[in-house]
Image (cartoon, rainbow, N blue to C red):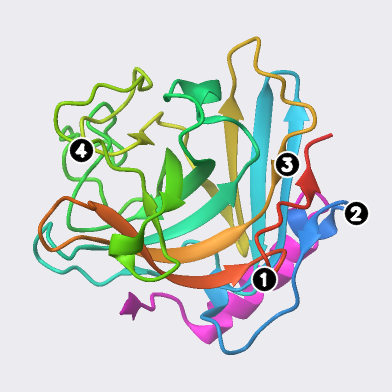
Amino acid sequence: MIRLTVSLAALALGAGAALADENHAIDQENAVKSAADQAITASFDILAAHATRNGQTVTFRMTTNGVAGADTPEPAGQLGGAPVLSYVWPTSLDPSAVGFEGKTGILAFAATSHPDFDDTPLFDEDADGDPANDGTKWHSHWVVLTPTEACGEGALGVRDIPEGETPALPPTWPGLPIFIDSPGYTPVFDGPEIAVTVPFAAPVETAGISYDGVTSALRVHANIHAPLLCVTDVFDIASGDLSLPGRVE
């Protein structure tokens, strides 16, 4: 269950202010746009997803129908069964572009919140001197998604690393037995907008990357592995069909 943390008045004020900012996804002519849906929690109801580049950096943006980042999961109290909420930009990039084993699934950039565990061991997001207690704070990941029947019929999961296998992984891999990276890029929230700027090492070609926008819920498997992390609910898809129609120019 999502914890609602903003009043309707704050939601309306925040949305109005950010929609007036021409730098936001909703204002970009080539953004992947989506109609509002009152059946979706407003902070996860996508109005637009966009990505733009400046040399070797790409800024991923998403405009929602509410205050982005305002809602976080209710804690489960343990790792097994722990909920995760996410803003996700699936891309056309091969996983090897950020250090994963190549040709292993869909490379997606995500901002997540999960109060039951901290998977960013190199970073202290709340600056309290403890890098292991920041799971609720919105933070960023690269993940590799694959069809995972153990998560449910037609469901996606974060690709597992079977025991004994040693695939290529990014240097900021947090040590979990899944294809996940914790690179430390900070999400920035502005009313209904979330934005994250991501650097890419040469020779990754940033022009022409295809992308989409998704809001979703995930859950840690009760047995902690096999599979470890499943997509359990998709709230909204900017394109409607995960066709990755956006293109970084």
- Give the SS element for disc 4: loop
The amino acid beneath tag 2 is Glu
| Residue 161 place in picture, x, y as percent | 25, 36
Magenta-highlighted residues: 1-24
Circle on res. 114:
none
Q: Mark 2 packing: few (<14 Cα in 10 Å), some, or many (20+)?
A: few
Eye-nearest disc, 1 or 3: 3
| Residue 139 place in picture, x, y as percent | 40, 44
Residue pointed to by mark 3? 210
Residue pointed to by mark 1? 15
Q: How far apart are marks 2 and 1 (CA)?
A: 19 Å
Residue pointed to by mark 4? 128
Q: Earlier in the sequence, mark 4 or mark 2?
A: 2
Q: Is residue 137 magenta?
A: no
Eye-nearest disc, 2 or 1: 2
Q: Do the residues labelled 1 and 4 touch (CB within 8 Å)?
A: no
User: Which residue is outermost to the bottom?
Assistant: 39
The amino acid beneath tag 4 is Asp
Q: How far apart are marks 4 and 2 (CA)?
A: 41 Å
Q: Is residue 13 magenta?
A: yes
Q: Distance between the residues labelled 1 and 3?
A: 27 Å
Question: Measuring 58% from the left and 71% from the top, which residue is drawn there?
Answer: 236
- Give the SS element for disc 3: strand
Picture quarter with the C terminus: top right
